[in-house]
């Protein structure tokens, strides 16, 4: 059964909200990792520093991917919303 444009828009809006939540969660992860790195500065733990740097790099790449996916999906949402308004 085909969904109406309004139903599709509702689902897409829900997806956009969830992507925003994922983005915010990832941002929080990056901030917390930064705080851990600052705390470790005083005790010098090279092994953990190395591992945290890997996690930080991956988290930063992931947030960029999430943001791009969110922006691309929002473009599709806006296009369908504009079409539904006609």
Image: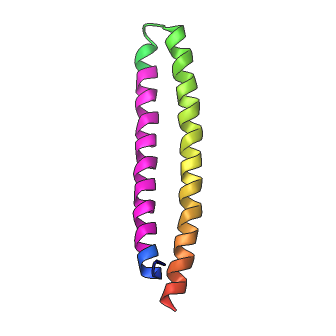
Q: As displayed, is residue 27 above or below residue 73?
A: above
Q: Residue at x 52, y 92 (%)?
A: 86
Nearer to us in this view, 37 or 80: 80
Is residue 19 one of those drawn in magenta? yes
Model colouring = rainbow
Q: Residue at x 53, y 29 (%)?
A: 56
Residue 61 position, x and y percent, is: 60, 39
The quarter of the picture where residue 39 lies is: top left
**Which residue occupies the foreground of this view, 8 or 36?**
8
In this view, 84 is above or below 51: below
Depth check: give the residue in front, 10 or 57: 10
Q: Nearer the viewer, residue 38 or 23?
A: 23
Question: Among all residues in the image, which is located at the extreme bottom?
Answer: 86
Q: Is residue 50 above or below residue 20?
A: above
**Which residue lies at the image location 40% right of the left edge and 60% below the top edge?**
17
Q: Main secondary structure of the magenta part?
A: helix
Queried whether the magenta region covers residue 34, the answer comes back as yes
Q: Which residues are magenta?
A: 9-37
In the rendered image, the residue lying farthest to the front is: 1
User: What is the number of callouts on the image?
Assistant: 0
**Image spot of residue 54 (x, y percent):** 57, 24
The image quadrant of residue 42 is: top left
Q: Position of residue 70 (x, y in %)?
A: 53, 58
Q: Is residue 74 above or below residue 6?
A: above
Left or right: 22 as drawn, with respect to 60? left
Q: Residue at x 45, y 54 (%)?
A: 19
Residue 63 image offset from top left, x and y in percent: 53, 44
């Amino acid at each position: 059964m085909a969904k109406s444009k309004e139903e599709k828009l509702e689902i897409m809006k829900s997806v956009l909200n969830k992507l925003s939540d994922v983005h915010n969660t990832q941002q929080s992860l990056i901030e917390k990792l930064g705080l851990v790195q600052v705390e470790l500065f005083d005790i010098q733990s090279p092994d953990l520093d190395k591992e945290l740097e890997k996690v930080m790099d991956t988290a930063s790449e992931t947030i960029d991917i999430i943001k791009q996916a969110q922006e691309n999906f929002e473009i599709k949402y806006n296009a369908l919303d504009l079409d539904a308004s006609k």
